[in-house]
Structures are given as C-alpha cells and as structure tokens.
Image: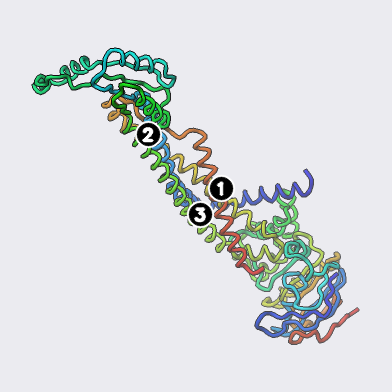
Amino acid sequence: MITFDNVTKRYPGSHEAISNASFAIEQGEMVYVTGHSGAGKSTLLKLMAAIERPTSGTVLINNQNVSKLKEATLPYVRRKFGLVFQDHKLLYDRNCFHNVALPLAINGITGTEAGKRIRAALDKVGLLGKEKAMPITLSGGEQQRLAIARAVVSRPSILIADEPTGNLDRNYAEDIITLFTAFQQVGVTVIIATHDALGQFNSGNQVDPLNKILHLDHGTLTKTEVSA
Amino acid sequence: MNAWGYSWFSHHQQALELVLRRFKSNRLNTLLICLAIGVTLALPSILYAVLDSVNGLANNVKTESQVSVFLATNNNEDTIANIKGALEKNEAIKNFEFVSKQDALAKLQAANSNNEVLNSLEDNPLPDAFFVEPRQLDTASITSLQAELRQLEGVGDVVVDGAWLKRLSYLILLGKQAMLIVTSLLAFALVAVIGNTIRMQILTQQAEIELSRLIGATKSFIRRPFLYAGALYGLFGGLFALLITFIVIFLFNRSIAPIAAEYESDFLLNMPSLSTCVIICLLSFFVGLLSAYFAVSKSLLQTPK
C-alpha cells in the first residue's frame, strides 16, 4: 500500500530529517512509528501522506510514485488519507458538525448525504451529542476525538495520526487507541506516531493489535518490528 | 448530470453558499465594503448621466442652428436671384429665408430704441442676407456647406451661427475623455479596495486554507469562495452605485426643474438606461472578480503547500 525505498528527506538549511528509510506497509496493518522527539516521525508521516516529497528515494502510494506526480494531482492522492494532526488543527470559528464537514466538502459531498456521514463519524467517536458545540468548549480528549471524526468522515483507506495521545492522560489515551484499533479491525490501515513507551497502553488485558513498529533514531530507521 | 458535472456544480454551489454565509455573519463589514465600492462607482455613473443629458441638450439646440449667407454690398436683383436658385438646388439645405437689407434695417430700428445713430447713417450699411437651415447638422457637413456657399458669386461672407455649439461639443468630448480617465483611475482604486479586502479574508481563513490543502483540497477549491466574494462585492457595489446615481439624479432634477422653467426649458438629467445599468453592474462584477483573482493567486503562491 505504502512503500518506501531508500527515502531521504532533507529540509533546506537543515540536517537530514529522514535518512535512507526503506519499508512497506500493507493494507489493514496497524503501524506504530516510534522514536524520541525530533527523530523524524512527523516527517515520515508527511512523506507517507504525500504532504512532503522525498529529497531522494522513492515513495510509492498505491503504486503511484509521489515524486513523479504532478503538483495538481497531489491533492487527489492526499484524499485517500485520513489525517489526525499533532496540533489537531481544528477550526475554532465553526461548530463540531462543520469541522467534520470540511473533508466532505473538499470531496464535493454536501447536503443530506454529508449530514448522515458526519453524524455517523461523530457517533463513532462518541461526540454525537456535541455536534452543535464549538471545539473550544471541548476537553482535550474530546478535541482529539473530534479530529479523528474529521479524519475518518470521508472513509479513507489509510488513517494517519501524529501523536494522537500526546498530551492525554492514560485513560483518555487508551480510549483513543481503542478507537484506532476499531478502525483497523474494519480494514483501515492505521499509522500512529508516538513517543510514548508502547507498553503504557498495551499492557493489561488490551488486545494486542500490533502489526508493525517503525522505530526512528535521528532520522534513521533502526528497527522494523513485526509482531504476530 | 454525470458525476463530474455533479461535483463541479456542487463545488460551485457550496462556494456560493459559504460566501453568502460569511457575508451574513459579517453583515456590517460587507455593507461598508459594498458601499465604498458603490460610492466609487457612483461618481463616474453620475458624470456619465450629466454628459449624456448635456449631449442630448446640445443635439436639440443644433436643430436651431443656422448658416448666415451675407451678400456683397454691390449686388443687383440678378445675383440675388441666382443665389436663390443655387440655394434651392442645393441638396444639403433644408430651408432658407431671404432678408433684404431694408428689412434688416427696419428690424434693427424696431429692436433698438436709440435710433439716433441709425438715423444718422447716410447709407444702409447692412447687406442682404440668406438664413439657411442645413439638412445635416454635424460639423463636417456644415463646414463643407459653408465652403460651398462661399464659392457662389456675389456672396460676401458665410457665418455659421453654431460656433458656440461647436465649442460645447468639444467640451462634451473633453468631459467624456475626463470621465474615461476618472473611471479607469477609480477602477484601479476598486482593484485595490477589493483586493485588500480579499487579502484580509485570506489572512483570517489561513488556518482553514492550510488544513484544506493538507487534506487534499485543490487550489481552485480554495480559490473559489474568494473569487465569488470578490465578484459579489463588485456586483453589490454596482447595485449600490446605481442606487446612489438614481437618488442623486432624482434630487438634482427636483432642484433643477424650477430653474429650467425660468429658461422655458424642460432640461432634466436622464436616468441611466437599462443597458447602462447592466453595463455598470457587469463592469463592477468583473473588476471584483479580477481583483479577487489577483489577490488570491498572490496569497496562495505564498502559502507553503
């Protein structure tokens, strides 16, 4: 689904954010991208989502080479992804419903069909009762779930989340991970970047959906772990 | 409608709804911007109405314009008859009237209470004259008629009474050119006003624009609402301009009516015709659209993809 071959990303005037990364992600996998702050996790996710292009190497998304795509076709590639940003990027000038409506609007879906999908997405994350609420009135965990609802509303085949549990306490974090697991179980490829020790929310009687860990150390992929 | 067509239509409808929603939530601002555009556009519109009306007035007066043919003083009956025959044959002449020098003197005496000077004259100094009403009233044909009449034997001088008319038409022409210049300068001002407004909106929507680009919005999707906003500002501004023009002309006509009556004239400024209204609205619509396009293209280039 997503294949990296010797991918290097260097920002102008900076060191290599990603060096020679090679890996493949298959459909339906749950992938954790781990590593310390500044290890290049966000850059890796941006490369996966066709937001950044590699400096060298090849990024294939559904067998399309991102480097060779025209600028004008990139938006259409990006629509395959549901993105949950580190800083949520919620729009505070509109209510929850309209926040979730944006990806559908971009896809040209409006009206009752959009309304149905938006409510379904809000329902999935447990925010159905808050569709008229403004994002600023939500708690941190609720804002995160709103961001997830927005990411899944256009039914993407790949869900990418950057530090979705970053500043949540353990209970909230577990809720969020459970939510992602639920999406993975219906066939969505889920990619999560996290600096947390994984054991923190994988211990106990939680199911272990872990398929793959990509561990980054200063931009270099140090281990690719596949658990059964 | 196929899927692509549907999506295209839906995108446009969506952008329009979004813009109208933004206008509604920002009513006062929108109103002020449209008013500013309206006032800017009203100026050339009123100027146009004034020029148009004065032009009409000048055209009316022209029908009264005459060419005076003064004969040389030493004429006999034959030359007068010859000239009369030539005038009758001339296609360019609609009508003419002969005033002999005796008649002219009598008229002058009748009109002048102080007859001492006139009575002291030994000879009648006035020439015989024909007053000619030309068929064509434009400058070119009057000038050629004047030249033609000068060629006739026994003609002393040919004077066109409409010299002031000529000046007036030059003034109107000058006014029209001034209007064009003012209009184009104001159009630039409009581009600046609308462009700045759109730029401000882009700044306030920066978060949405950035997010939209990240999750797969095309450039045109992002551009579209701003283009609609610019075009609508222009259109509403144009409607305001018409409203202002109609009100100003109405008020002006109300105060000019008694003055015009004193001059036994029914001079009134013409209200803009339907086609003028349509042209003003279209013009402001496109100026709005264009300035929004420039503003958005510039700002979008600056946004990192």
> Is A81 placed above or below B169 here?
below
- Against A220, residue B68 (above or below) is above
Q: Residue B54, which numbered label?
A: 2
- The residue at the point 64 percent across, 51 percent down is B15
Q: Dot 2 falls on which chain?
A: B
Position of B13 with respect to B258 (left or right) is: right
Q: Is residue B250 visible?
A: yes
Horizontal side of residue B296 vs B244, given as left or right = right
Amino acid, disc 1 = Phe
In the rendered image, residue A89, in percent from the top left (x then y), is placed at 65, 68
Tag 3's secondary structure?
helix
Frontmost of labels 3 and 2 is 2
Give the x, y percent position of residue A65. 82, 69
Q: Could you tell whether B125 is left or right of B65 in the image?
A: left
Q: Which residue was labeled with disc 1? A: B286
- At 31% across and 33% down in the image, what residue appears? B164
Instruction: For marks 3 and 1, give the CA distance.
Output: 10 Å
Per the model, the C-alpha gap separating discs 1 and 2 is: 29 Å
Q: Nearer the viewer, mark 1 or mark 2?
A: 2
**Mark 3, residue position:** B191
Q: Secondary structure at mark 2?
A: helix
Front residue (pair B147, B5): B147
Nearer-N-terminus badge (3/2): 2
Figure quadrant of the N terminus of chain B: top right
Question: Which chain is disc 1 placed on?
Answer: B
Say whether mark 1 and mark 3 are on the same chain. Answer: yes
Crowdedness of circle 1 by 10 Å Cα count: few (<14), some, many (20+)? some
Q: Residues within 10 Å of mark 2 (few under 14, many from 20)?
A: some
Q: Give the residue type at disc 3.
A: Val
Residue type, mark 2 in image: Val
